[in-house]
Amino acid sequence: MAKLKPWEVSDELWAVLEPLLPQRQRRFRHPGRKRLDDRLALQGILFVLHTGIAWEHLPQELGYGSGMTCWRLLAEWNKAGVWQRLHEVLLDRLQAADALDFSRAAVDSSQIRALKGGRRPARRRSIEGESAASTT
């Protein structure tokens, strides 16, 4: 089998990813244009991310649809949490295969969001500008 290009999705990866994608319902009353195949759209997304070209410059000749379609699906899948779920599924598979080695993992403060500005001193009430109660 020929080696896949970095943006081409293997059948094995597609079998893992496809069930994670949100189901799209085709409209019957005003169906419009038939939607691009999800696998082709994913390959278009990966092509843009791998090559660094602008979305609007995705070559139509590749058959991945327009760059805007790929961008829209990337945003839709991101909002649906597809990438987070894929990450979790792949980690579970690696852990089940005993292929994860955390002995070389390093976690530092860049992995934890820091509070901005540190601790603030207690707010002190100022007595300037306040007048004492009048006794007359």
Image (cartoon, rainbow, N blue to C red):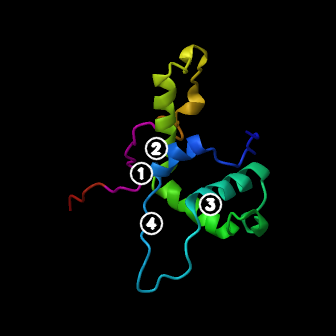
Depth check, mark 1 against mark 2: the one in front is: 2
Extreme residue in the bottom direction: 29
Which quadrant would the C terminus be assigned to in this image?
bottom left
Going from the N terminus, do you reach mark 4 or mark 3 first? Answer: 4
- Give SS at disc 1: loop
Write down the region rendered in magenta: 120-131
Is 28 placed left or right of 8 in the picture? left
> Which is nearer the N-term, disc 1 or disc 2?
2
**Comes first in the chain, label 2 or label 3:** 3
Pointer 1 or 3: first along the chain? 3
Which residue in the protein does label 4 denote? 24
> Extreme left residue here?
136
The residue indicated by pointer 2 is: 85
Disc 1 versus disc 4: distance between alpha carbons? Answer: 65 Å
Tell me if residue 111 is in the magenta stretch.
Answer: no
Q: Percent x, y for residue 123?
A: 40, 42
Determine whether the residue tagged by mark 2 lies in a helix, strand or loop.
Answer: helix
- Amino acid type indicated by mark 1: Glu
Other residues around mark 4 within 10 Å, as few (<14) / some (14–19) / many (≥20): few
Q: How many marks?
A: 4
Instruction: Name the residue carrying label 1.
Output: 128
Mark closer to the observer (1, 4): 4
Sooner in the amino-acid sequence: mark 1 or mark 4 = 4
